[in-house]
């Protein structure tokens, strides 16, 4: 594959594409990037200090009321999700507080007996521990005060998996997602979604590869096998694009509606990430990603009538498309870019960059400079009062909140790492500044009710753990110096980020 135009531009850029010998002669552009990185780090410290003072070791901070809640079973979700960001930001004091805490978690008891989401627990807790283990045994070694605590990261990830693995004990091996630990049962759902089934395989495979116990990876790969070979055939309206819900008892799909939105999203994301993780074992996953990517370009790429220059992905029900998307789906640009780099297919990079621009538009068009949770662009269903907005912006808002989600900045990150174009650093910085000023309140940063109202409407008094794991990590890494855990612009990645932005060492190379 030829990155001719990009590479010409890159030769003059500092930072990620420069030869090591030039790093001592930083240009203005690099030093401003590094002061931006410092500013993001300062925000991380503000948010962490608020959490540590008022919420730790509960799951999340309520920054307005200086209180807390336990929406993730009370195991300290923000601490587990923050550790890898604290590591890459080189904040050893925070890292060691979290390292001292992790061995004390009891995975056998869920706060108030609430159901445990296999998916959320895997992508936040298990992934945070495995990634911290990879980083602290690799490029960020020397940060831990107590090496026993580093070993405990892997031990506790395995303890967690041992507590959760009964979820896969179903007729098909497709797990139930919502688990009642106290009596080793579940919420009785007869179906599970492709996102929650298909976003376990990286974490559970990494756990097997690190422990030498193959059973964890086998459980997740068996469940995934039903998604790779979807039945019945009507559940795949176009090659690679499949329905959302799968019957746990039979392994058959229950519908043919889907897309890249929540419920489906990270199933597609992990198809290519498994290939990045290990191209020798996961070639079939890559083939399924290519099929889905090609069908997406052919059938789901969609342009609003008022702004034909913009591209978003429609959802579908069978072969009927539906012009709705949202903040969650904005990881799509980054995922296409990653696939294009790794497979050396410029068409996927270019398509990904067009999706990145569409998602940037959802930020720049609102009063706060932050994109909404949900948006649509069907010109026959514009809500009254939003006609003028639709004409200018190309979309209308269907859900006005911003809940500290990362996906738009995540895709800016991939766009910058692929192209070296500092425009994407500027976009990420503008998004960060908007989030930093609009959501800051009390002891931290809060979800807001309305991205298109002055000051964001009202504060919802909740700081989710993914603000630490994702928003602040991608905002930081896009401005930070190159490192082995950063996405590689030639597709030669030594790490792959899970869906919660925890970087995992790829298989086959020593830690
Ligand atoms: C880690 O060690 C440093 C240096 O000895 C010390 O200042 C710090 O308090 C320790 N942190 C924790 C959480 O134990
Ligand atoms: C659950 O995890 C705890 C550690 O938090 C561990 O002591 C226990 O053995 C695990 N339970 C199972 C069934 O593996
Ligand atoms: C397990 O506990 C939950 C919550 O207490 C209860 O609703 C459910 O009926 C129990 N299931 C079994 C199989 O005992
Ligand atoms: C899906 O759409 C195709 C083509 O429009 C049609 O032939 C098929 O019957 C539909 N399938 C279902 C399950 O609705
Ligand atoms: C747009 O909305 C109209 C009216 O609800 C509907 O008939 C049409 O199928 C929609 N088109 C798309 C592409 O979503
Ligand atoms: C981010 O917000 C914090 C808290 O309001 C503020 O102190 C800091 O200056 C802001 N950072 C930037 C770069 O504006």
Image: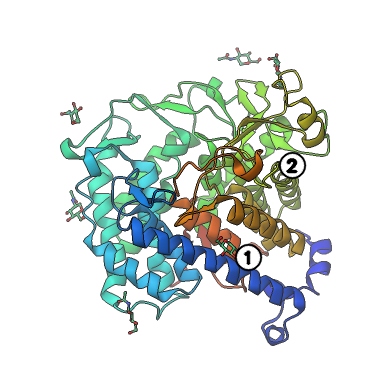
- Quarter of the rendering containing residue 326: top right
Q: Quick one: label 1, few (<14), some, or many (20+) residues within 10 Å?
A: many
Q: Is residue 154 left or right of residue 227?
A: left
Residue at 55% in and 55% down:
471
Q: Quadrant of the C terminus?
A: bottom left
Residue at 66% in and 48% down:
336
Q: Position of residue 380 (x, y in %)?
A: 75, 18
Residue situated furthest left in the rendering: 183
Q: Position of residue 405 (x, y in %)?
A: 54, 47
Q: Is residue 53 left or right of residue 510?
A: left
Near-viewer residue (465 or 123): 465
- For marks 1 and 2, give the CA distance: 31 Å
Q: Is residue 488 left or right of residue 164?
A: right
Q: Which residue carries the number 1 mark?
A: 488
Residue at 40% in and 66% down:
132
> Would you say the residues marked 1 and 2 are in contact, meaning their CB atoms lie under 8 Å apart?
no
Q: Position of residue 230 (x, y in %)?
A: 49, 29
Vertical relation: 486 (above or below) 340: below
Vertical relation: 55 (above or below) 422: above
Near-viewer residue (291 or 400): 400
Q: Is residue 414 left or right of residue 350?
A: left
- Quarter of the rendering containing residue 395: top right
Earlier residue among tags 1 and 2: 2
Q: Quick one: label 2, few (<14), some, or many (20+) residues within 10 Å?
A: some
Q: Which residue carries the number 2 mark?
A: 365
User: In the image, which disc is placed on residue 308?
Assistant: none
Near-viewer residue (326 or 207): 326
Q: Position of residue 390 (x, y in %)?
A: 77, 30
- Labels in figure, total: 2
Q: Quadrant of the N terminus?
A: bottom right
Q: For ligand 1, which image quadrant applies?
A: bottom left
């Amino acid at each position: 594959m030829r990155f001719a135009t990009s590479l010409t531009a890159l030769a003059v850029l500092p930072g990620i594409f420069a030869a090591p010998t030039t790093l001592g002669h930083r240009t203005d552009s690099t030093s401003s990037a590094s002061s931006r990185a410092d500013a993001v780090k300062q925000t991380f410290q503000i948010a962490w200090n608020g959490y540590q003072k008022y919420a730790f070791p509960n799951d999340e901070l309520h920054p307005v009321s200086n209180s807390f809640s336990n929406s993730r079973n009370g195991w300290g979700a923000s601490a587990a999700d923050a550790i890898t960001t604290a590591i890459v930001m080189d904040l050893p004091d925070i890292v060691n507080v979290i390292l001292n805490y992790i061995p004390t978690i009891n995975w056998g008891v869920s706060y108030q007996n609430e159901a445990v989401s296999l998916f959320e627990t895997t992508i936040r807790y298990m992934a945070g521990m495995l990634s911290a283990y990879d980083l602290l045994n690799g490029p960020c070694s020397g940060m831990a005060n107590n090496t026993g605590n580093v070993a405990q990261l892997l031990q506790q990830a395995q303890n967690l998996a041992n507590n959760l693995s009964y979820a896969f004990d179903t007729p098909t091996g497709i797990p139930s997602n919502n688990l009642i630990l106290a009596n080793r049962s579940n919420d009785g759902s007869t179906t599970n979604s492709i996102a929650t089934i298909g976003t376990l395989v990286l974490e559970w495979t990494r756990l097997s590869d690190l422990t030498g116990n193959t059973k964890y990876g086998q459980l997740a790969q068996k469940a995934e096998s039903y998604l790779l070979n979807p039945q019945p055939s009507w559940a795949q309206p176009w090659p690679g694009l499949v329905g959302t819900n799968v019957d746990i008892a039979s392994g058959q799909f229950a519908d043919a509606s889907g897309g890249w939105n929540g419920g489906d999203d990270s199933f597609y994301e992990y198809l290519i990430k498994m290939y990045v993780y290990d191209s020798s074992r996961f070639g079939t996953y890559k083939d399924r990603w290519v099929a889905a990517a090609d069908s997406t370009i052919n059938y789901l790429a969609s342009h609003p009538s008022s702004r034909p220059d913009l591209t978003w992905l429609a959802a579908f029900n069978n072969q009927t498309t539906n012009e709705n998307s949202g903040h969650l789906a904005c990881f799509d640009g980054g995922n296409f870019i990653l696939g294009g780099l790794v497979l050396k297919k410029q068409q996927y990079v270019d398509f990904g960059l067009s999706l990145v621009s569409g998602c940037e538009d959802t930020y720049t068009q609102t009063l706060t400079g932050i994109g909404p949770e949900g948006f649509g662009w069907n010109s026959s269903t514009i809500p009254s009062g939003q006609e003028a907005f639709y004409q200018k912006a190309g979309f209308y808002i269907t859900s006005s909140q911003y809940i500290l989600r990362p996906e738009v900045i995540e895709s800016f990150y991939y766009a910058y790492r692929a192209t070296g174009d500092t425009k994407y650093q500027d976009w990420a910085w503008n998004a960060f500044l908007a989030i930093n000023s609009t959501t800051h309140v009390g002891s931290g940063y809060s979800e807001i009710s309305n991205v298109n109202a002055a000051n964001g409407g009202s504060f919802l008094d909740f700081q989710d753990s993914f603000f630490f794991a994702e928003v602040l990590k991608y905002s930081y890494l896009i401005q930070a110096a190159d490192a082995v855990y950063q996405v590689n612009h030639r597709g030669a990645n030594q790490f792959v980020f899970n869906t919660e932005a925890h970087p995992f060492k790829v298989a086959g190379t020593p830690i």
